[in-house]
Image (cartoon, rainbow, N blue to C red):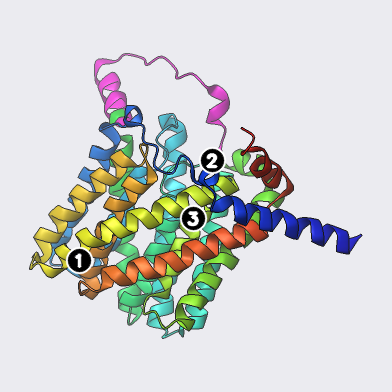
Amino acid sequence: MFASTLTRHLSHGFSALGHAVTPRGLRGVLDVDFGRAGLAVPLRVGVAVAVVFIIGGVTGQHAVAGFAALGALISAFCRPDPYPVRAGRLAVLGTGITASIGIGAVLGATGSNVFLVTAVVSVLAGAAAYLVWALHIVGPGAVVFVFGAAGAQVFAKDAGDVVLSVAVTAGGALIGMLAALAPWLYGLARDRFTRTHRVAESGVARREPIWVTLRRAPHRSLFARGVRITIAGALGAAIAMALGFEHPMWALMGAVAAMQGVGYHVTVHRGVQRLLGNVAGAVLAAILLALPLGYWGAVVAIVIFQILAEIASTVNYALCSVAVTPMALLLTSLGAGLAPAAAIDRVLDTAVGIVVGIVVAAVTITGVDAEAVARRPAQ
């Protein structure tokens, strides 16, 4: 019985891997839908990020302004949610990104070795993905938590750095939350001032408390998916280290980004799209890293790329990755400084993570996913 189950599962895995490299499996990778593009949310995200960078520049906190920007990035989440629902979920996200950066900072301040860092950040990736899935949160996903933790681990050298990075992230998250809820808060203030009553939004069932949503989540299934991401992240980082790459956390993030989709075909599409976007984005990043931009020049570029990434996120993930790659490298360079060659490292590390993510997703594919993959050629 066990041998037959194992054989069937391995057969599903090999079929899924074969599907990943067929024209039918890759169909749709370059599809774009500009009809889904919007400006309101991207501009609000851009404003939130710009505000925290301006505060960081004026106060001389250039090295930690990036953490505040990651906190402000919660404004990119929960786009489809009614504002009352969005408020609670954004609060959870703000707490989560602040905790993630705190965990990374503690790892750095205590001088943890690369193996412990990889293990902790991989578990963090799985836990963050679980939380995002359980609360039905739409947005950049768990990779933001991983990026923040990895950056904080490199930055923090003592307890003071831990406190500073956590404090600025929390402040940035508050600004991001205000930016995301600005239209709603403005409407409430206007109605109170004019003493009018707003008509209740539709979708009462979607207004259930966060704890109720968590209780309703399919915990066993989501836990299994979170474990898969943890394993893929750790394995991606380990392979990157074995190959002598200098940034194994980028491989970890590549695996997480590829696997945070729902189905196997989404993992394949996101992986290929992220790789294509990283190659194009790396060219832009290398050019910008070679220029003497300074803090304010880098900030302008980061804000522009952030807005473009948010616009492209609903159009095509490859286009989104073209903007995300230089933005992420410029963000990292604010605290650590990067040479243009880091753009090549980004592509190589990310490629390792993506391949590992697709392989792990295939090896651990569920029966439902395997049937869906088998049906796709016929469709």
Tell whether label 3 touches label 2 (CB within 8 Å).
Answer: no
Residue 150 lies in quadrant: bottom left
Residue 187 lies in quadrant: top left
Q: Tell me how far mark 2 sits from mark 1, CA to CA.
A: 36 Å
Is 166 covered by the magenta stretch? no
**Mark closer to the observer (2, 3):** 3
Circle 1 residues within 10 Å: few <14, some 14–19, many ≥20 = many
Q: Which residue is mark 1?
A: 286
Residue 166: x and y, percent? 35, 65
Q: What range of the chain is rendered magenta?
A: 184-209
Q: Is residue 278 left or right of residue 208?
A: left
Q: Compared to 302, does 147 lie above or below?
A: below
At 31% from the left edge and 75% from the top edge, which residue is drawn? 155
Circle 3 residues within 10 Å: few <14, some 14–19, many ≥20 = many
At 44% from the left edge and 53% from the top edge, which residue is drawn? 272
Q: Which residue is mark 3?
A: 258
